[in-house]
Amino acid sequence: MYHYDDNICLSQQLLNELERYIKISHHTWISVSQFEDFWDYKYNISPEEVANSAGYTDLRKFIHSSGRFAIYGTSEHENFYISLASVFPHCLNYAPKPYKRNKRRLIKKKVHKSSQANSTPHLTIHEIKSVEDFQAALREIIEMKITQNPTVSLTIEVVSNQFYQSYKKPIRVVIKNLCPQLKLIDLLRTIPDIEVNQVDQKWKISLSKPVRKSSV
């Protein structure tokens, strides 16, 4: 099992895993699709989501901004190859090898993006000007996610990703502006009926009371 403390740690973990993956692959270039399949299988969260939560519009920009990697682009922005910046420009002497993506992974990625798009409209987007506004927004996200998947454990990462998708701001930025003295876990614990517990070295979120269904 793998432990994430917050989005900063998770984004740094992704970069570290990417560097390690390139080194053990024994290839000068690796396809981003190849790494996405590895990461998604290991952590059950897409690299794109991690990049979004860190405040970047896409994975390519996030990886490039670290300064640790060289990017080999193709005609499609989302399809690119990655090498270590430490071997640049030597890596240009070697052409990337095409990577044939696992069809199941590709289908899973498309379904995941579709489910994200379908889930967002259920939220009422609030203007966040205070800690109380922030708490209300987080509570609504948690209630929505638990209602959608009552049998699936809700993690800090899922809440952070949904917050970014809905409000277009990294959750850590809002925390820094409104309550810099608190961590996300501490803030969640201040919200009534929200419980945060560590299970198998991962923080899990639940409701102490069932979500009330709106009457028709």
Image: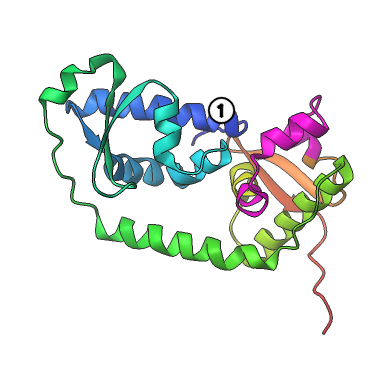
Q: Quadrant of residue 36?
A: top left
Where 174 falls versus 135 (above or below)? above
Tell which residue pokes out farthest to the bottom in this image: 216
Residue type, mark 1 in image:
Cys
Mark 1 — residue?
9
**17 or 29, nearer to the observer:** 29
In the figure, is residue 180 to the left or right of 110? Answer: right
For residue 132, which quarter of the picture?
top right
From the viewer's perspective, tell me whether residue 8 is left or right of residue 177.
left
User: What residue sits 32% from the left and 56% below the top?
Assistant: 105
In which quadrant is the C terminus drawn?
A: bottom right
Q: Could you say where residue 96 lies in the image, as x and y percent from the top left? A: 15, 35
Residue 151 vs 188, above or below: the answer is: below
Magenta highlight range: 162-187
Q: Residue at x 71, y 55 (%)?
A: 141
Scheme by which the image is coloured: rainbow
- Viewer-closest of 92 and 24: 92
